[in-house]
Amino acid sequence: MAAVATEARSVERALPPFRLSPGRIFQYAVLIVVALAILGPILTAVFGGFKTTGELFVEPFGIPRVFRWENYTDVLSSPLFWRGLGNSGIIVFGTVSLTVICSSLLAFVFSRLQFRGRELLFNFFTLGLLFPITIAFLPVFIQVKQLSLIDSYFGVILPLVAFGIPSSTLILRGFFRGIPSELEDAAYIDGCGTMGFFWYVLLPLARPALGAIVVLQTIVAWNDYFLSLIVLTDDSKWPLTLGIMQFQGQYGTDWARVMAYISILIVPAVLFYIFTQRYIVTGLTGGELKG
């Protein structure tokens, strides 16, 4: 115990003293403003879900006078909500699974296999990072229609996978290239083939990068709206993001329940990101593995 206390005191002496300098105060003020700007819409949606539509229009940013829990319970008790949750789960699972499989194989090819024109082909492949899916809805819709995937889950999943592969491959390639060649030689000496080295050595070592890809693609697929809107015509296949339309009636919209629905939709995504952001940080900054 004495040794531990002595070590703790030495560490404490090594740390610089904490001072609130004007520069640090300014940094904290900027961070607080940015945090409020980010959390403002989320808190507005959460508190708006406890109001009536009339109260929401009169005091959109205030705390509810009476918390109306029935807005949330009505949403959670609706069969449409759970059906949309199942549809979102299918889209998320399909997108993440295919993206991880395809990007890991491509990253392996572009990092560990030697062939003529590899770097040129990889640079051409990463041009997909310059074209977000939001500006390619028309050609995507035409291709999906030609493949007879309209009103199909794959009509949503495949474009999300296609636009997620370039960034995912780029992340994994950094990890794969950082693995020492001596480890590859040792695996081959022990009887591993090319796919054995990929499956038993590369993938386990690249778990941080794989975790980052899973988190990023989960958030993208969970929040998808416009692609599902133009591809899925059958409302029984709509994900949660399209379920907001069920609150639009002939003569108006129940905005209070819309806020409750939005809160239920975004809060899990925010919590998922908070608890998994360490995988993103590790996956994006730990690309050089040395041994």
Image: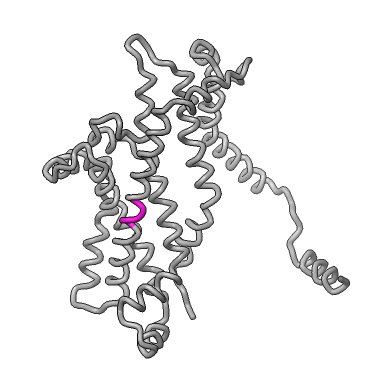
Residue range of the region highlighted in magenta in the rendering: 95-99
What is the x, y in percent for residue 64? 60, 18
- Residue 248, compared with residue 33, is above or below; it is above
The residue depicted at 46 percent of the width and 61 percent of the height is 283
User: Which image quadrant is residue 103 in?
Assistant: bottom left
Residue 96 shown in magenta: yes
Q: Seen in the image, is 241 located left or right of residue 48?
A: left
Q: Seen in the image, is 180 located left or right of residue 104?
A: right
The residue depicted at 51 percent of the width and 27 percent of the height is 45
Question: What's the colour scheme?
Answer: one colour
Residue at the farthest right position: 2
The residue depicted at 54 percent of the width and 43 percent of the height is 271
The residue depicted at 40 percent of the width and 70 percent of the height is 203
Residue at the farthest left position: 146
What is the x, y in percent for residue 2? 88, 72
What is the x, y in percent for residue 277? 51, 52
What is the x, y in percent for residue 125? 23, 61
Residue at the farthest bottom position: 189
Magenta span main SS = helix
Q: Seen in the image, is 257 located left or right of residue 185?
A: right
Location of the N terminus by quadrant is bottom right
User: Which image quadrant is residue 206 in?
Assistant: bottom left
- Residue 139, compared with residue 277, is above or below; it is above
Closer to the camera in the image, 173 or 120: 173
Residue 273 shown in magenta: no
Closer to the camera in the image, 158 or 291: 158
